[in-house]
Amino acid sequence: MAQTQSLSYTLVITGAPYASQAPQTALGFASALVQAGHRIDRIFLYGDGVHLASALSCAPSDEINWTQAWSGFLSENGIPAIVCVASALRRGVLDETEQKRYGKMASNLVSPFEIAGLGEWIDSLKRSSRTLYFNAAD
Amino acid sequence: MKTLIIVDKPPYGDWSGREALDMAFSLAAFDQPVSLLFVGGGVNWLRSGQNAENIKQKTVTRQLGAAAVFGIEEFLVDSEGLSAYGMAADALSADVICVEPGPDLYQQYQHIVCL
């Protein structure tokens, strides 16, 4: 049997949870990658996808909380996850640094997500074997 | 690493075009070759005489004007999209290259992004 080549991936999620299927499709794909022995360099949330990193979303008890599901998956597998700062600030997803900078009453970025710029996405384009996009319409 | 950013939705009703443009600006700022392709309703980004003041938005023509300054290599536009919206290539708000989107075009790029 031919040995499968191991690849590195970056997944960019631009669709919001509960408004699109993007976060759960991406999580299914990411889990399959890990099971198949591939490496995930980075998850990058962009546009409406940043809502996935809000600690304040409360799913009904009979629905999956996609923020928690993603947070657990990332922590278990030690995968870096970046939230685009420009997208996050517009949509009210803040870490403590941005909370202080803008004088807001709270921060809500869920661990292990971190806020950073599009430079991280560009680094992924250069570094990963594949960069895939999970959009609202997908 | 050559990247193609595709804008396929009209300006103003949707934020994805602006965020696609931000990606293009960032690539250019990091000295990475990048082209913008406007297809379908996205060709309306290039319409002359736009004024978004009454809907309390910034007119996108100014943002596109900054693209050359940032070093975005070229604006490509889907010929069919222009026809569909009754727009002429020589009456747009920016210099463009008319193309036929498809495999021949896409294979020139290592990365293609369409939000």
Image (cartoon, rainbow, N blue to C red):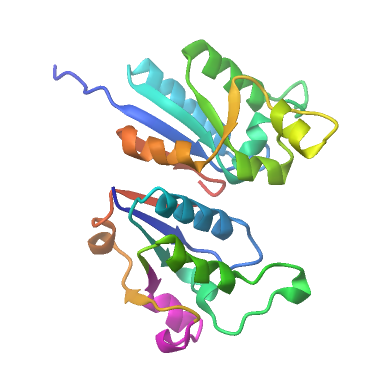
Where's residue B8, x and y in %?
49, 63
Residue name at image x 77 percent, y 39 percent: A102
Q: Nearer the viewer, residue A85 or A2?
A: A85
Which residue appears farthest toward the top when viewing the image?
Answer: A76
Residue name at image x 62 percent, y 45 percent: A86
Residue name at image x 59 percent, y 69 percent: B60
Q: Nearer the viewer, residue A97 or A71?
A: A97
Where's residue A48, x and y in %?
63, 44
Q: Is residue B89 above or below residue A116?
A: below
Is residue B84 in the magenta section?
A: yes
Residue A62 lies left or right of residue B20; in this view the side is right
Write down the quadrant of residue B18 in the picture: bottom right
Residue A29 visible in image: no
Where's residue B17, x and y in %?
55, 60
Residue B49 visible in image: yes
Residue range of the region highlighted in magenta in the rendering: B75-92
- The mark tally for this picture is 0
Q: Is residue B5 above or below residue A20?
A: below
Q: Is residue A80 above or below residue B9?
A: above
